[in-house]
Image: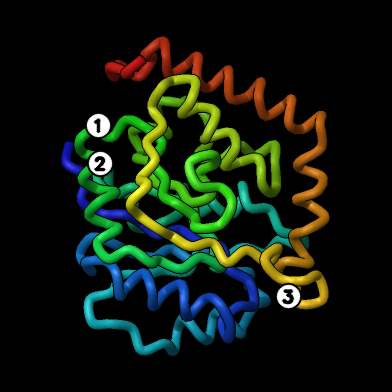
Amino acid sequence: MRYNKICIMVPTYKRSKTSLPVFIDSALATATLKNICFSFCVNKKDTETIDYLSQRDWDYGTEWEIIYEDLIQPNLAYYFNKMYDETKFDSSGTCVSMFGDDMVFKTYGWDEKFLNTINNYNGIGVFWADDNYIAHDQLCVNLVVTRKMVEATKHRFMCDLFHADMIDTIWMEVGKLTNTGHYLNDVIIQHNHSTKKPGEEWDETFMRLRPIQIQANSKGNQAMGRTYSVIVAGILNTGVSGATWDK
């Protein structure tokens, strides 16, 4: 199996006049078009974002789609799982991912670096880049994995016990426990997180998500997340998929 494409998966809400265009433009400016495609998860009532994506002057040959959701409260795990399940870019050679609409691709050729590393490890592993903020090698706040890896876990792409945060922590722990975490320190995908700004400058999107983030990071949920990670890592380490897992 040769992995030849990354589906850039991103939930987005009412940021079509702020960070979303920067996110898209930076991805296109730093990658080879044939190596990437976009899957956007958008609320049905967010006509501002839907109109922006539909009317945008896309580069010729750009592949993209909208996956619609209709939740009242945000649920990041649900969004990513919905994209994973419903995307038309679902070939086994296309990697899945976790990105935020407040990120900026800074490294030219980031797509090639990811794909080369993923192919070097036969699609096995948790792959992420430097966020140029506070996570760096400590947390995969951006993430690229293969469907082979997800399917081998015998679990959903994102743990649906948590509606925010913890989902990246779980993938990070799985990578550690299986010794399959791969940090691309020469690739910068800058995270312009709202916490860089004073509270009075936080936008509607972040304010909508913030209470759920706080709840997800409770001590009880952190313990639940660790347990979940151990279970998933145990499945991978027993090789139930038939794959050979590096220890």
First in sequence: mark 1 vs mark 3 = 1
Identify the residue shown where x is 67% and y is 29%: 225
Locate residue 152, reporting x and y percent: 40, 26
Tell me the kind of residue under disc 1. Answer: Tyr
As measured in the structure, the alpha-carbon distance from the residue carrying label 1 to the one carrying label 3 is 40 Å
Residue 64 drawn above or below residue 187: below
Q: Which residue is mark 1?
A: 121
Identify the residue shown where x is 62% and y is 63%: 193
Q: Which residue is mark 3?
A: 203
Left or right of residue 123, residue 39 in this image: right
Q: Which residue is mark 2?
A: 117
The answer to whether the residue labelled 1 contacts the one labelled 3, judged by CB atoms less than 8 Å apart, is no
First in sequence: mark 2 vs mark 3 = 2
Identify the residue shown where x is 41% and y is 56%: 87
SS under mark 3: loop
Locate residue 148, reporting x and y percent: 33, 33
Tell me the kind of residue under disc 3. Answer: Asp
As measured in the structure, the alpha-carbon distance from the residue carrying label 2 to the one carrying label 1 is 7 Å
Left or right of residue 127, residue 206 in this image: right
Q: Badge 3: few (under 14), some or many (20 or more) residues near its Cα, within 10 Å?
A: few
Tell me the kind of residue under disc 2. Answer: Thr
